[in-house]
Amino acid sequence: MSLLKVKNLSIGFHSPAGYSYKVVRNISFELEKGEVLGIVGESGSGKSLTALSILGLLPYPRAFHSAETSIMFAGTELIDNPHIQEIRGKKIGFVFQEPMSSLNPLQTIGRQISEALLTHKKISVKQAHAEAMRLLSLTGIANPKRRFRAYPHELSGGQRQRVMIAMAIANRPDILIADEPTTALDVTIAAQILELLLKLKEELGMAVIFISHDLNIVRRIADKVLVMKGGKIVERGSCENIFRYPKNSYTKALICSSNILKKNSIVSRDMAASIQHLAVRFPVARNFFGKIVDYFYAVNGVSLTIKEGKTLGLVGESGSGKTTLGLAMAGLIESVGKIFVKGQNIRDISHKELHKKIQIVFQDPYTSLNPRMNVSEIVGEGIKVHFPQLSKKEKDARICQVLQEVGLKSNCLEKYPHEFSGGQRQRIAIARALVVEPEILILDEPTSALDVTIAAQILKLLQKIQETRGISYLFISHDMRAVRALADDIAVMKDGKIIEFSSATQLFENPKQTYTRRLIYSADLEKKERRGLKQTHKG
């Protein structure tokens, strides 16, 4: 008998206006003991709602299920089960996407893990504390005794996710549901979390439901795969068959989205920008009189060049100094050292002139776009500043032209950012940057907040814009697959310094640094390596 059997699951919501609508429609699947089931699809496909409904975590009574819906766990019906609280955390554990919003910021890590134990087990506080430290050690957190007393904000993203996993497995559940557990993490940390889940699955004998929008992530861990779109399952099968012989066009699109290739381009020897001995430091300690006595160097003596019409990929984990370097180059934070654009030192030009030469596109378009301004105002703001001599008709024409260039229609001019999808908002951000005709575009993780298929569209758009305009890019990312799609040259950054610099082809074929090899390996395990990873944990 299957450990979990979901039959004809439908999920709907009652709107404040009095009408109802369905978002998940009649999906069915089974989960066997010790099996890893991957559920993939874009945002809005119904993946997370499906997972939340298993433990009755939807906002009832606003949310509802159809009369035919059934979720059976070990022979027990979970729909409208009055005792489901006893199953949550004890029999079925849940790891959420963003641990910082799931952990209590006012309680220590140790207390939160202990609470999960004390809720379901008849043990003393002392025993709960000892078990919590054992779980921290089991999930790979160094110095568990010290981390036991730490608060969530004192841990890194990967450490917080390990804490969430420790809480989820505290009571040795039969099923662990992991909802996008690697989305917010660096590629190397994400690989560690995947290995950890596989290790714990074998040691504890758990079944796992692993939810993601990235098929390449699911490929590393899953035995079976469900592909969801628009609240329905459009394809299902073994992991091997889904990747070798995908049948549905949407599944094929998901697979292809992760394999965008860099287009061949003409060799360029001219320099668009040059950075020499750049340093950015922040004060970290002051003496009794308030004088700064120690600094932290986020960027430490970096020298780089960006070729005209080419892309320099800047890669590294969070905290390596990538974004800080980009902000310094754009003149948005103070720095020391020299920065030249087309041979001109940016220290010798005004901020206005610099911001015309260099524009930046940020990671999250929702927070970088003014919610009180419509598209026409957002994109047209730069024209007002840098081209005040243009008439209103000329300004409107330029706005429409750049919107068309990024794949948006002019009928969106009066709309506001909240009326667009994530991918559309990023296109608006790119249009805002391009409208002033910059010579260099700094792209700071422009696809990391997007679904894999939308990210692929943005990468293809950036390829097309560079081909058409001949613009130079500084492409900042921790995702080596995205970098491979755009970069001509790559600089690898670690602890504020450049540890490796070469052409993209040379770096991917023959990386010199262990750190670089780890980034590449984590982002793109070969089929043999991936199979070996699973077999290692199967013993």
Image (cartoon, grey):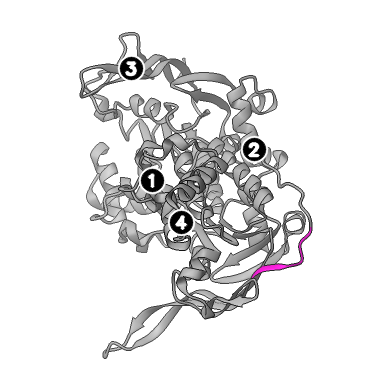
Q: Which residue is mark 3?
A: 76
Q: Which residue is mark 1?
A: 98
Q: Residue at x 72, y 40 (%)?
A: 528
Which mark is drawn over residue 383?
4
Q: Residues within 10 Å of mark 3 (few under 14, many from 20)?
A: few
Which quarter of the figure has residue 170? top left
Which quarter of the figure has residue 266? bottom right
- Rendered location of residue 228, percent (x, y): 50, 24
Side of 472 where 395 appears, left or right = left
Mark 3 or 4 closer to N-term? 3
Mark 1 or 2 closer to N-term? 1
- Of the residues tagged 1 and 4, which is closer to the observer? 4
Q: Which residue is mark 2?
A: 535
Mark 1 or 4 closer to N-term? 1
Residue numbers of the magenta segment: 267-273
Q: Residues within 10 Å of mark 1 (few under 14, many from 20)?
A: some
Q: Residue at x 42, y 33 (%)?
A: 177
Give how far apart the Cα atoms at labels 3 and 4 are.
Answer: 63 Å
Mark 1 and mark 4 residues within 8 Å of each other at the beta carbon = no
Q: Element at badge 3?
A: strand
Q: Residue at x 56, y 20 (%)?
A: 236
Q: Residue at x 49, y 49 (%)?
A: 394
Q: Element at badge 2?
A: helix
The quadrant of the image that shows the C terminus is: top right
The residue type indicated by label 1 comes to Glu
Give how far apart the Cα atoms at labels 1 and 3 are.
Answer: 30 Å
Q: Element at badge 4?
A: helix
The residue type indicated by label 3 comes to Thr
- Of the residues tagged 1 and 3, which is closer to the observer? 1
- The outermost residue toward the right is 267
The residue type indicated by label 4 comes to Ile
